[in-house]
Image (cartoon, helix red, strand yellow):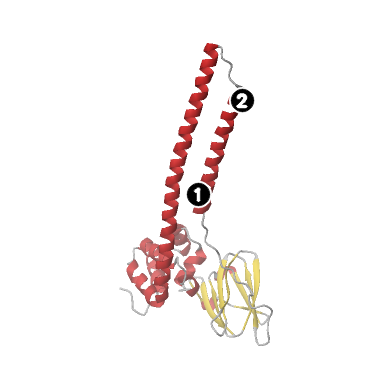
Amino acid sequence: MQEQNQSLGEILRQSRESKKLSIQQVAERLRLSVAKIQAIESDDVELLRTDLARGYIRNYAKLLGTDAQILLDLHSQAYPQQQQQIFIATEALQKKADQYRALRKNLLIVFVLMVSISLIGIGAYHGVTYLAEHQSMPVSNEANAENEAATEKQILDKEQVAAEVNAQADKQESVNANTNANGPMQQGQIELKLVFTEQSWTSVRDIEGRSIYNKLAEAGTQDLVYGFPPLKLIVGNVHGTKVYAHGSEISLDKYMQNNVARLNVE
């Protein structure tokens, strides 16, 4: 039984470790990034405030065979405003789903009508051709041209409707990359240099708790971050990240737990 003072992320991490699963294995099974799994286990505020957080928690708990309701209750206690936001978002999503189903139904009706009209047109064309061949009645080139034009228009109309349906169905999750949003370094601020040799999620907050850097960086990139100290730093992939402050590299190993480092830089 989990201790009451344990956080949501700690419960998931300990459950994962008891199952002898690595973060990489969990990420592959849930089809999420390693950085996102690390953020969940680190109780990252930015992630847990999103509309998708409860879905991530429920699926993670299901994978580990853990009681999801306990974790969802912890999330509700930590983020009471999130319930209302999720309800509103769910209503909006349901409305969109209903509209999409109605559009699909209409598209099916239109498609059936198009096919029926096409079959009637083809049957009429072959009937006229048959009469022309057996009764020596020449088929009008003008009539053939009109039939071909009508058939082509039906195909184009059907493709246009299908394209509109696909355009409404396509939705992608946006990625928030906030780098040096506070502009050039000001007096009293310190500079952090972040060098990434592997893909890594990193979060930096200033003395007032404001998020001044929150990004999933790619391997081979680097960033400069300025902020008023002490800066609260979370590194999601210690083995793939180097941090420099005051011109010297900070040893992340002594702050590391499960390849995640938490530290304050002054």
Q: Position of residue 16 (x, y in %)?
A: 40, 66
> Does 219 sit above or below residue 234?
above
Within 10 Å of disc 1 (Cα), the crowding (few <14, some 14-19, many 20+) is some
Q: Secondary structure at mark 2?
A: helix
Q: Earlier in the sequence, mark 1 or mark 2?
A: 2
Q: Quadrant of residue 149?
A: top right
- Between 125 and 92, the residue placed more toward the observer is 125
Residue at the image position 67 percent from the left and 77 percent from the top: 183
* Outermost residue to the left: 1
* Outermost residue to the bottom: 188
Image quadrant containing the C terminus = bottom right
- Between 150 and 178, the residue placed more toward the observer is 150
Q: Position of residue 87 (x, y in %)?
A: 39, 67
Q: Secondary structure at mark 1?
A: helix
* Residue 235 visible to an observer of this rendering: yes
Q: For the residue marked with disc 2, what is the amino acid?
A: Glu
Circle 1/circle 2 CB separation < 8 Å: no
Locate residue 239 relative to residue 92 in the image: left or right: right
Q: For the residue marked with disc 1, what is the amino acid?
A: Val
Q: Which mark is residue 142?
A: 2
* Nearer mark to the viewer, of 1 and 2: 2
Within 10 Å of disc 2 (Cα), the crowding (few <14, some 14-19, many 20+) is few
Q: Quadrant of residue 245?
A: bottom right
Q: Which residue is mark 1?
A: 165
